[in-house]
Image (cartoon, helix red, strand yellow):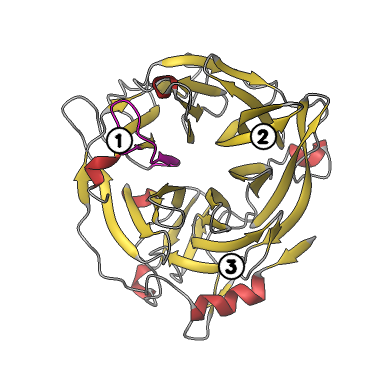
Amino acid sequence: MHRTAGIAALVALTTFSAVPAQATQRPPREITATVETPSLFDDEAGGDADADDPAIWINRADKRRSLVIGTAKNGGLRVYDLTGREVQAIATPEGGRFNNVDVLTGFKLGKRTVDLAVVTDRGLDKLRIYKIEASGLTDITAANVPLLFAKDEAEVEEQATGYGLALYDRYAVVSRRHSTRLGIFRLEEKNGKVTYRTTDTLDLPRQFRLPNGTSWAPCGEPGEDPQVEGMVVDAEAGVLYAAQEDVALWRIDLKGGHFSSVPRIVERVAEFGVPATFDPESEECILDTANDPGFGGRITADVEGATIYPTGRRDGYVIVSSQGDSRFFVYDRRTNRPVKVFSVTDGSRVDGVQHSDGAAATAVSLPGYPKGLLVLHDGENKPDDGRVSTNFKFVDWRSLNLS
């Protein structure tokens, strides 16, 4: 089933927003990280490793052996223990580029119940699936899994491929790079391995009717539509939160393997509605801020990594990255009302977080993190020593002073 949210979503834009336009800015709470993972370097000497998106796996038998799994794009997957030490590195297949990762618990594989780490391989337009054990990750991707979005390998070369990812039940929600499209894919066992098939697709809008009656489309490179990357599913509520980078954080209801509601905006980016022109020389969009119509929210584009910290079956918090100004916004999970803004600044041992792409949270009590753990991608790790450096920062949830 395929559907387009365009017209309906335009109506929703003017009728629902948990955070009103021009919302009052709150000063961010400044916190520090407790642990960081080793530096990754996006150069030949570093194996073109660029940290991007984390996920947390809880070892129920021995929480001390829980793991943090992070994508490193061309550098594959990196697996860390709770001290931030790298315990496993997994290379991409030839031509692969690992973008986002999420964890799924309780998957039936034959007569066993296993936990999975699923990765979007944006280089090959496929999902890769790994069985998680305390000893590490094992690839159990079925041979000849289908392409996610592309019609053929020629289209894969254009790299409008699988990008963002969120898991729930037996399903993966995947976004398409340089596109507004979201797909739902059902994970299925095949001879002891795992494959998948499409169950639904949805196109978010690429153009918006503003409250003043004019139309606006976010600026981008010609031929590229406003994409989604950061996503998380609230499985108990049956809700997908999808961060459309230059537009807004969306809330979309799910039912089984299908999208089941008109997408609604939780909060728009600050640049929403602002005219802009793409400059081919700098490959940047030049904002015409003098003609800002005032319909934006507080998030400075891009809106990125999304995660949920539960405090009950339906209660807790939704956290998203305001990548443009290196802040994070926290919303009430039940009402989506704004709760807090925070930033991760330099501490005595660990530097802060800038331009974060990905986030993962757990409320499970872990050694050193009695109220849970928040893991954040750091897009500008220090010191860089003249090389582009990224990594992941571990934050004690107690420092947010929320619960």
Work out whether residue 155 or residue 129 is closer to the camera in this orientation and state it: 129
* Spatial separation of the CA atoms under disc 1 and disc 3: 31 Å
Real-space Cα separation, disc 1 to disc 2, in angstroms: 29 Å
* Coordinates of residue 375 in the picture (x, y in percent): 38, 35
Task: Examine the rendering and report whether any part of residue 75 can be seen.
Answer: no
Residue 221's x, y, as percent? 58, 53
Give the residue at mark 2.
107
| Residues marked 1 and 2 touching at CB (< 8 Å) | no
Snapshot quadrant of residue 17:
bottom left
Where is residue 211? Give x, y as percent. Answer: 48, 83
Which residue in the protein does label 3 denote?
263
Q: Which quadrant is home to the N terminus?
A: bottom right
Q: Quadrant of residue 147?
A: top right
Identify the magenta region.
356-372
Q: Determine which residue is flagged by label 1.
A: 395
* Secondary element at tag 2: strand
Helix, strand or loop for disc 3: loop
Q: Is residue 359 magenta?
A: yes
